[in-house]
Amino acid sequence: MSAPVAAARATPSRDASQMYKAVIASSIGNALEFYDLTLYLYFAVTISKLFFPTSNPTTSLLLALGSFGISYLMRPLGAIVLGLYADRVGRKPALMLSIVLMMVGTSMMVVMPSYESIGILASIGVLAARLIQGFSVGGEFGASTAFMVEHGPARKGFFASFQFASQGLASVMAALSGVILSATLSADQIGSWGWRLPFAFGLLIGPVGLYIRRNIEETPEFEATAEEAANSPVRDLFVQQWLNILLATGLVATSTALNYMISYTPTYAVNQLGLPSWIGFVASFVGAVMLMTVAPLVGHWSDSIGRTPIMRAVVIGVFVLMFPAFALLISYPVLLVIVPVLALIGGLKASYSAALPALMAEIFPTRTRSTGMNISYNVGVTLFGGFAPFWIESLIAITHTALAPSFFLMFAASVSLVCIVLVRRKFGLR
């Protein structure tokens, strides 16, 4: 079994400016990619009508959400391909490639004709765009996290927390887009052409992210160990580090389940609570702000007290608080209730996710870090995130209760709690 990275040899350091440039380079691309993913969920109802029309609105929505989930099946492939590329060639080239692929997928969403115009080709085109984006995002997490922690090994928790703070920024941007569109355009205008505007805005950010990533230096830790890169990182991972992968995948469960609950809120608010769409967007905005602002603070804190105490406290909080929170929300489906509930979910998500990437990075050695983190993260996200809206809608249909999201979140928290305990005992990581 490979020793944790905490035991790896020291590597050359870079000055502070390079460290912060690394954070910006990783964060801007990461924000762009998750901005696009979040938009799809925010406009799932509109997309279902335009690209997956049926006589039953619920069936159309399930098809749209199913296409969102199916795209996540590409994430493990992107995790392996781009992870290998990052571990063999470098973190920087992998980050540049992932953002280019995301721009391709986003472009397809901006220009794709509706089902009314080109029939089934529209549905296939949207699915193809999701598959490209799924492949791209699959390679982003490991490379960008490795890029940040290897530029600042003494502050892994703080720097790696921007992995999720940037996702919070993406959700803030997406929620603002939803609020602005809902306030300025009619439902018919949004359904006709307005929903494309936020995707087009995201596309404009892509070249900026690509430029920044092109002008940042490779990580010193990768350069110091480049000659020792594994000939077959995948074989090493599954033969020698299989337990690392299983545990890291379980650690991801709570983070991604909470994240996609925040993104899914606009759809949940409209379909299950009968609220106007703008209330869902406002609530998601609050949850995203919590993620964006709290994550760096908790990440900094984790460098002092450790990752596992924070993460353990959060998963216990999820298990205890989610059922009563959703019961309250269902009993009082108003803005003054949904906003505090989403703030709670956002705070729990931020606190847990702030410590997560640094802990995952410490589980894998440098030579297999990007591939190992990519595989673990994307398998976890596929199981607990990509299909989360589909599972939740299905659970609601089966159980006939809008409390179903709380059941899903508590299950994810249970999985993560077991893995946190095992990581601490097996690897001695705190």
Image (cartoon, rainbow, N blue to C red):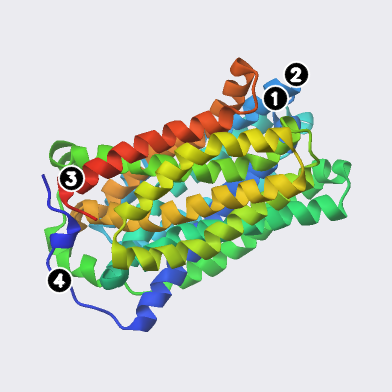
Q: CB atoms at circles 1 and 2 under 8 Å apart? A: yes
Q: Secondary structure at mark 2?
A: loop
Q: Which residue is mark 2?
A: 56
Quadrant in the picture for the C terminus? bottom left
Q: Secondary structure at mark 3?
A: helix
Residue 392, image x, y percentages: 57, 28
Residue 169, image x, y percentages: 57, 61
Q: Secondary structure at mark 1?
A: helix
**Which amino acid, mark 4?**
Ala
- Measure the alpha-carbon separation of dots 2 and 3: 51 Å
Q: Which residue is mark 1?
A: 60
Disc 3 crowd rating (10 Å Cα; few below 14, some 14-19, many 20+) is few
Taking 227 as reference, is 425 above or below it?
Answer: above
- Measure the alpha-carbon separation of dots 4 and 3: 24 Å
**Residue 168 can be seen, yes or no:** yes
Q: Which residue is mark 4?
A: 10
Residue 16, image x, y percentages: 35, 82
Q: Which of the 4 quarters of the picture holds residue 126?
A: top right
Please name whichever residue, 380 or 94, is drawn nearer the observer in this view of the structure.
380
Residue 352, image x, y percentages: 42, 52
**Which amino acid, mark 3?**
Arg
Residue in the picture at 26% in, 72% down: 154
Please name whichever residue, 211 or 341, is drawn nearer the observer in this view of the structure.
341
Taking 301 as reference, is 83 above or below it?
Answer: above
User: Mark 4 or 3, which is nearer the eye?
Assistant: 3
Q: Which residue is mark 3?
A: 425
Please name whichever residue, 358 or 196, is drawn nearer the observer in this view of the structure.
358
Quadrant in the picture for the N terminus? top left
- Measure the alpha-carbon separation of dots 4 and 1: 54 Å
Please name whichever residue, 217 or 260, is drawn nearer the observer in this view of the structure.
260
Q: Earlier in the sequence, mark 4 or mark 3?
A: 4
Residue in the picture at 30% in, 63% down: 305
